[in-house]
Amino acid sequence: MSNQPRDRWTLQAEDLGRDYEGETVLDGISLTLAPGQPPIGVIGPSGSGKTTLVNLLMGWDRQSRGWVEFGSENPYRPRRAAKKLLKAALRGVHEEADPTVDQRLPNRKVLVAARRLATRTGRDSGLDDAGLLGIVGLAPETLLRIPRETSLGERQRFAIAVAIATDPDVLILDEPSTALDPPTAAEVLGAVVAHSRTRGAAVLIVSHNLTLIDALTSDVIALYEGQQVARGTLDRILDHPAHEYLADLAAIRAAEATTSRPGAHPQAGPPASSAFFSRRDLTG
């Protein structure tokens, strides 16, 4: 295990914008992910630009306006000499898996490749295979399987384990709890964030799960139709909503708080938030 300090890179984005076929899907977004800072959360309904933002920050897509820089590199087009280091230092996971990884490969080969990348770039997560899997709540036998032999939740957790295997400077998690039940999501993601912060990494969490965002972040960016409509703690942006979307979320949270009080008798059926979100698609 290596505990030697090293310089960590900062990810910065300024006035990011992205157009598709003449339509603006993201515009004017700025943020910084610096070593040691508290995790940042991103919320927003379907079509708000959350995944587009992740793609631009990771270098999986190219911005139409503004700029993004990781250390001194452009994630979309880094210098050839910096490609391996950037791949190890900037890690992102989509809902089910890392889109850059061949899902036909056995899990062991995927993790071996990540650990080899860590070695070649002088990085050490501080964990062996069992430790990496343990953080995300997976048994060592997971390494003997291929993705189709595992559940979506297991795939999601394994992808996160692979991401932290290279001891990244920045970890970006896009909807990391979609295939996990609430207790598992809280335990696993709490452990991942705690480990990442101990190692000095910056973390960005994009999620529709407000409970998770509230528990793990103290700085939240709210997107709506590609625009940032608020930023601050979740309590502040919901207590003083600057947009109808946030006012709707605040009303839902208030209703849930009322029905969860001792002695309250909510009507039979799904929780108010489940019905509302499926009807209005506020946070998909």
Image (cartoon, rainbow, N blue to C red):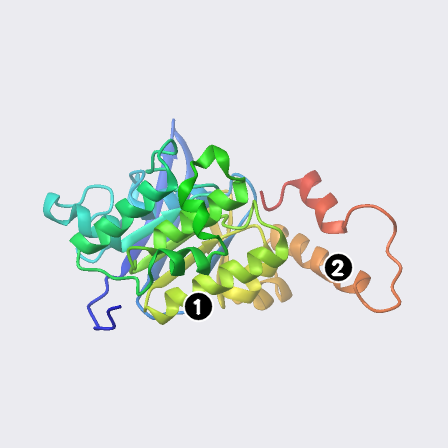
> At x 57% / y 60%, what residue is drawn?
186
Q: Residues within 10 Å of mark 2 (few under 14, many from 20)?
A: some
> At x 47% / y 49%, what residue is drawn?
157
Front-lying residue, 237 or 10: 10
Q: Measured from the top left, where is residue 274 in percent x and y? A: 71, 46
> At x 53% / y 67%, what residue is drawn?
233
Q: Measured from the top left, where is residue 182 in percent x and y? A: 62, 55
Q: Earlier in the sequence, mark 2 or mark 1?
A: 1
Whether residue 82 is situated above or below residue 197 in the rendered picture: above
Q: Residues within 10 Å of mark 1 (few under 14, many from 20)?
A: some
Q: Nearer the viewer, mark 2 or mark 1?
A: 1
Q: Amino acid at mark 1?
A: Ala
Task: Kindly tell me whether residue 27 is visible in this rendering.
Answer: no
Q: Measured from the top left, where is residue 173 in percent x and y? A: 43, 51
Q: Which residue is mark 2?
A: 256
Which of the 4 image quarters holds residue 144? top left
Task: Kindly tell me whether residue 248 is visible in this rendering.
Answer: yes
Q: Which residue is mark 1?
A: 194
- What is the secondary structure assignment of the residue under circle 1? helix
Front-lying residue, 40 or 226: 40
The quadrant in which the N terminus is found is bottom left
- What is the secondary structure assignment of the residue under circle 2? helix
Which of the 4 image quarters holds residue 278? top right
Q: Amino acid at mark 2?
A: Glu
Left or right for 195, reference 67: right
Left or right for 204, reference 150: left
